[in-house]
Amino acid sequence: MKKILFLFLVFFTLGLYAQESVEITVGDTIVLLKPAYSTNYKNIDYLVKTRWVDTSTAWQWETGIDFYEYFFSKGDIDGKRCPITFEGSKARISAVQHYPDTTGKTTGRTVFMCTPSWNKRAMFWVEAEAALEDNEVRIIHWKRKD
């Protein structure tokens, strides 16, 4: 019985290690899980573009390059902490941005900019490390063709 339990723990640990080593990239999907702290998510904001100004700004769908400029360059945006009503929602990671810490105290923070398929004028701004640590999101990896 002890050997079976030991083997189970070894395989479970290896499975967790394998999951952690997978790189999260543009094209992956986030799923919003139940927030642990309140009726709003602690590490996720919900942004809606309320006014678009016609610009020539384009972004690269496959890589996420220029998505930030595309979404934020011109127009108006309403933002708020993401409410619990979005629990279970899925959104494609459209861009990944890393902001280094200028004080040198930490390595910085990473943000996922995620667009839900049901509202192209909206975006989830996800503080990646904190949201994953607080179990607010789950990642579904996109199957890439190598």
Image (tube, helix red, strand yellow):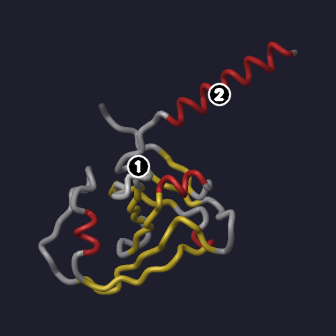
Disc 2 from disc 1: Cα separation: 26 Å
* In the image, farthest residue toward the left: 56
Q: Is residue 101 above or below residue 79?
A: above
Q: Residue 47: percent from the left, percent from the top?
A: 42, 76
Q: Which residue is tagged 2?
A: 13
Q: Residue at x 40, y 73 (%)?
A: 122
Q: Secondary structure at mark 1?
A: loop
Q: Residues within 10 Å of mark 1 (few under 14, many from 20)?
A: few
Q: Quadrant of the N terminus?
A: top right
Q: Quadrant of the C terminus?
A: top left
Q: Is residue 90 above or below residue 133?
A: below
* In the image, farthest residue toward the right: 1
Left or right placement of residue 73 versus residue 23 in this view? left
Q: Nearer the viewer, residue 86 or 82?
A: 82
Q: Residue at x 48, y 71 (%)?
A: 45
Q: Are marks 2 and 1 in contact (CB under 8 Å)?
A: no
Q: Is residue 65 above or below residue 71?
A: above
Q: Which residue is tagged 1?
A: 107
Q: Secondary structure at mark 2?
A: helix
Q: Nearer the viewer, residue 49 or 6?
A: 6
The three-letter amino acid code for the residue at tag 1 is: Thr
Which label was assigned to residue 25?
A: none
